[in-house]
Image (spheres, rainbow, N blue to C red):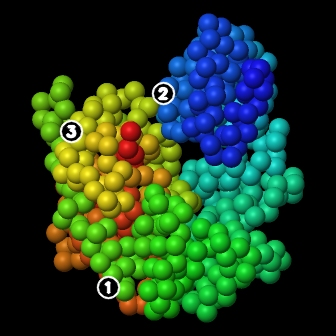
């Protein structure tokens, strides 16, 4: 097979989700003495799809070395640096691409994200506008920019206008409507979000994304007849859909049909055995129906661990380290509002992968958590359940971010569908709140985010304290008890996946 045919086949496999096969095809191409520019790019792209970004960067660097005047090579390098959270380097790589004639909207989008992460907000807004000027109907960039405008200024109308502009430029309506609904929800306008989706469901009958989003908002507002109507319409469109099955089960849980919910979720898990969302809801259905699966999935004493961090090398005490870590993290909390598409409310979240930070305290943090993660994996051991059967006793960090909650701040109950082990590390805690009878500021486990019948309150709590790392399965519901004291809560969170 010629190189062109091999690359075409690899790209087709990646489009189908068969990334491992694509990697196998391109490995021989990049092992040649002088691999082509395209071979290096496709292989790096396949590596990024499976989360092996550091390895992808090696091949992007080869392309830079061999094709130094190629603006595409510099763009690819910048994009991987941005994926790795190495924002300052990504900014410079984008600028190298621009000096070589690059004028693509994709490069301006990477430039915007990297500038945003470095705190250069004026320049980041310019870059977002340049990207959308060149490709005004790209919904992903429009939604990202709208979210950014909301976080920076808390201006719903300005963020909404970004989405409207994309629509009038020809962007498909569904993702824009979903972005609008999350924007309104983030601003506390839940009724407005639900009304938007209700109108969209009438004008766009059969659109699964709209129907499922409308189901979610109806559940949040405890309008169960509406939720059931939406999910039945979705089932009529595609009853075999994994997402439709999940939402149908959630409605069953609200309607006191936990056995039916569990049967549906077990059926979906037969096809998607590592799906963390399905396992999270299966645990909920098992708890509601008294099925022993709940005990297997949510034996909190066995699968939730709290570890107090040892003082990293180079610091005289844990307090001194936490003080430096706090300063480094606060540098990235430059937003007025929470993101539209995350669980926190009344606070801010970092928007770049923290493992790419060059701050010494942040780098030391990721070195220091290695020991407790490995201790926890050893404690879990291996077994047949969905957590332990994936335990290889090794891991890689897949996502890492920081959250700063203000007074009245909290996390909605949620799980992490892309993880295996998830976490909360406490840098600063609202100490007066923690001693309240309501356990304000504590992390809680087991309470789903929607109404259930029977009700399912939190089943487990862990008290935060500075320097404490809490590890738990990614499928497990967790949230924060809101705190009302005049304090803040600063955390780092990450997901780990088997390596």
**Residue at (28, 56) in percent of width and height:** 383
- 403 lies above or below 255: above
Pick whichever, 357 or 333, lies toward us: 357
Answer whether labels 3 and 2 touch (C-beta < 8 Å): no
**Residue at (32, 75) in percent of width and height:** 294
Alpha-carbon distance for marks 3 and 2? 22 Å
- Label 1: state its secondary structure: loop
Badge 2: how crowded within 10 Å, few (<14), some, or many (20+)? some
**Residue at (38, 39) in percent of width and height:** 499
Disc 3 target residue: 371
Tell me which corner region of the image, top left, top right, bottom left or bottom right, holds residue 79. Answer: top right
Q: Is residue 83 visible?
A: yes
Give coordinates of residue 477: x percent, y percent.
Answer: 37, 68
Disc 2 target residue: 54
Give coordinates of residue 472: x percent, y percent.
Answer: 30, 57
Q: Earlier in the sequence, mark 3 or mark 2?
A: 2
- Label 2: state its secondary structure: helix
* Quadrant in which the N terminus appears: top right
Answer whether labels 3 and 1 touch (C-beta < 8 Å): no
Q: Is residue 285 left or right of residue 83?
A: left
Alpha-carbon distance for marks 2 and 1? 45 Å
- 66 lies above or below 209: above
Q: Earlier in the sequence, mark 2 or mark 1?
A: 2
Q: Nearer the viewer, mark 3 or mark 1?
A: 1
Badge 1: how crowded within 10 Å, few (<14), some, or many (20+)? few
Disc 1 target residue: 290
Give coordinates of residue 233: x percent, y percent.
Answer: 71, 82
């Amino acid at each position: 097979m010629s190189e062109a045919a091999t690359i075409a086949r690899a790209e087709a496999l990646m489009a189908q989700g068969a990334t491992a096969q694509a990697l196998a095809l391109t490995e021989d191409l990049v092992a040649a003495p002088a691999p082509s520019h395209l071979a290096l790019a496709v292989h790096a792209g396949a590596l990024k799809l499976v989360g092996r970004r550091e390895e992808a960067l090696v091949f992007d660097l080869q392309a830079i070395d061999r094709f130094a005047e190629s603006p595409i090579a510099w763009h690819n390098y910048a994009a991987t640096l941005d994926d790795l959270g190495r924002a300052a380097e990504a900014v410079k790589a984008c600028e190298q691409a621009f000096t070589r004639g690059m004028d693509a909207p994709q490069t301006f989008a990477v430039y915007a994200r990297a500038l945003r992460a470095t705190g250069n907000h004026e320049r980041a807004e310019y870059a977002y506008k340049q990207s959308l000027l060149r490709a005004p109907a790209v919904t992903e960039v429009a939604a990202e920019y709208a979210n950014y405008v909301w976080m920076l200024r808390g201006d719903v109308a300005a963020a909404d206008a970004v989405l409207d502009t994309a629509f009038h430029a020809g962007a498909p309506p569904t993702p824009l409507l979903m972005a609008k609904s999350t924007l309104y929800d983030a601003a506390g306008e839940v009724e407005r979000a639900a009304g938007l989706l209700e109108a969209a469901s009438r004008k766009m009958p059969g659109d699964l994304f709209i129907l499922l989003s409308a189901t979610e908002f109806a559940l949040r507002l405890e309008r169960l007849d509406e939720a059931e109507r939406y999910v039945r319409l979705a089932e009529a469109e595609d009853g075999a859909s994994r997402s439709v099955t999940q939402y149908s089960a959630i409605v069953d849980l609200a309607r006191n049909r936990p056995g039916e919910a569990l049967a549906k979720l077990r059926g979906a898990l037969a096809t998607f055995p590592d799906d963390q969302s399905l396992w999270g809801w299966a645990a909920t259905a098992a708890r509601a129906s008294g099925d022993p699966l709940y005990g297997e999935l949510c034996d909190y004493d066995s699968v939730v661990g709290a570890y107090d961090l040892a003082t990293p090398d180079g610091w005289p005490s844990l307090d001194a380290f936490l003080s430096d870590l706090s300063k480094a993290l606060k540098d990235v909390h430059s937003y007025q509002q929470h993101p539209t598409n995350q669980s926190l409310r009344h606070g801010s979240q970092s928007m770049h992968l923290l493992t790419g930070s060059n701050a010494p305290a942040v780098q030391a943090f990721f070195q220091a958590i290695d020991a407790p993660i490995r201790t926890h994996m050893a404690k879990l051991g291996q077994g047949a359940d969905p957590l332990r059967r994936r335990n290889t006793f090794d891991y890689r960090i897949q996502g890492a971010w920081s959250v700063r909650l203000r007074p009245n701040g909290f996390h909605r109950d949620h799980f992490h569908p892309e993880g295996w082990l998830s976490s909360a590390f406490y840098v600063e805690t609202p100490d007066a709140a923690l001693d309240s009878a309501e356990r304000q500021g504590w992390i809680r486990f087991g309470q789903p985010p929607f109404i259930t019948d029977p009700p399912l309150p939190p089943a487990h709590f862990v008290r935060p304290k500075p320097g404490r790392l809490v590890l738990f399965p990614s499928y497990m519901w967790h949230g924060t008890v809101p705190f009302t004291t005049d304090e803040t809560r600063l955390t780092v969170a990450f997901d780990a996946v088997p390596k």
